[in-house]
Image (cartoon, rainbow, N blue to C red):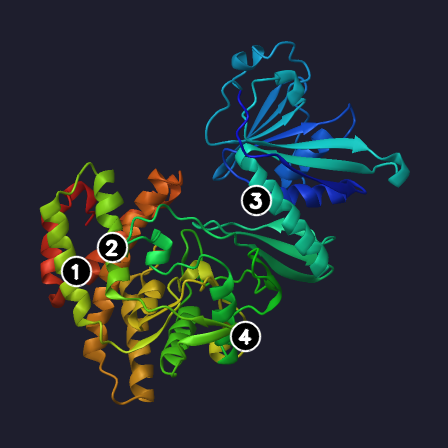
Amino acid sequence: MTEPANPPVSFSVALANETATAQLMADLALLTGAGDVITLTGDLGAGKTAAARAMLRYLASDPTLEVPSPTFTLVQDYDLGPLSVLHADLYRINDPGELEEIGLAPLPQGVMALIEWPERAAGMLPPSRIDIALTHRPAMGSGARVAEITGFGSAAAKVARLESLRQFLDLAGYSDARRERMPGDASTRSYARLHRGNISTILMNAPKRPDGPAAYDGKSYSAAVHLAEDVKPFVAIAGGLRERGFSAPEIHHADLDSGLLITEDFGTALFVEGSPPAPIAERYQAAADMLAALHGDPLPDILPIAPHIDYPVPVFSTDALLIEIGLMLEWYLPDRGIAPNDNLRADFVMMWRRILDKIADTPRTWVLRDFHSPNLIWLENREATRKVGILDFQDAVLGPAAYDLVSLLQDARVDVPEDIELAMLTRYVRARKTADPAFDPGAFAETYAVMSAQRNTRLLGTFARLNRRDGKPQYLAHQPRVWRYLNRSLAHPYLASLRSWYETNVPAPARPV
């Protein structure tokens, strides 16, 4: 195969023992995923299988996972939840043409491949790959190795980031920490828990996010709707929340340019329990109280990040809200076999603009944007609203207070019964009214319905896009739940025209009752 124009990127790592090897492979796993090819070269006994085993155990979150050498089976497959991995050993391959017979030419799409003895497949490997060349270093110790890591083609950027990540951990004093895999989210960010003794912290890997072409008045989708493109908004909002007595993670170490953070670890106590998960009433009450307290305070629209560096919190404008719900036309309807024509698009935008313009003068507050169960941690040892540990707020904007309450009470990943939604909504309104007699419950209920319709319309499109564009079909499972929430909001009299549009233009099979 012809090598891409990207020049290879290489660096070396001294590995004193298998623990150091496991740390390296965990760091690499943080930056790789489906479609990546990692080759392992070196003499017999150089530690190729040990490196592959360490990576598989990290990805499986199982330090005892049985990972035999595939010398005799040639290929071993591992289904690790959303990620499938194949581990191949080509030592017994005599001719590269044999790869087709064992299903490795071409490599299966959508899987990660760990390949030992790749030199036996000369000319058959993809041009974009990561190679780890392992050599013995007896002078450093009986189990010592040196790993030369090289990225070819598009994988060169991942090797460069791996080197930056390793340098960051070393400077922060965490190079010897034990890594524990954490589930990621729908973004380009990835996370690991770092253990040193009895103390754990969170490593956030947040590279600058590319999010498609400049298709929205010269901006990418993320820029047009004010999704954070680096870690600076996270740092700014975290500081603003902590300064006001709310529980956002303390940031211990930061490389703002590279997008690497080490933060406080809030633990694993969630706001839901059971199978399927259901809300824990006491914790949802605290979350509603926390939002009421946040929204009752006057909040600045500019926050400090570092000395002489400020962050202006962007405004959740009507145009940004319209671009978000446009995902319904761009991704959800085409996913249902409907190609929206110009008239349908114009009617949709005109109807939504009229609805959104009416709430444009609603008092603005910080909208944390994804204030729902996956991003809330229960902090039992703290007091009152500080029991609510808040994560994933880097996309915060200035907008209607109702938005975050919708995020909480219409959780796309968890069924929130309607009686709990109404009870928490009442609790929030009562707290706001008590603190401010001028608070208007009727106007808030109308804005709540609008924000619910807007958010759930956007989620239908987002989940369709994650499936079609990003190869993440697991998010489609949430669409029926999102429809149930959307139907609740469409029952509000103010949204009668919107309800009529959905009934007319979205086919019945896609609209569960």
Kind of residue at badge 4: His
Kind of residue at badge 2: Ile
Q: Which mark is residue 352?
A: 1
Q: Where 99 falls versus 187 (above or below)?
A: above
Mark 4 or 2: in front is 4
- Left or right placement of residue 478 versus residue 84 in this view: left
Is residue 355 shown to the viewer in this render?
yes
Query: Which quarter of the picture shows residue 438?
Result: bottom left
Distance from Cα at disc 4 to Cα at disc 1: 40 Å
Proximity of marks 2 and 1: CB atoms separated by less than 8 Å: yes
Query: Which of pointers 2 and 1 lies earlier in the amino acid sequence?
Result: 2
Mark 3 or 4: in front is 4
Is residue 413 shown to the viewer in this render?
no
Q: Position of residue 9 (x, y in %)?
A: 63, 38
Q: Residue at x 77, y 24 (%)?
A: 43
Kind of residue at badge 3: Leu
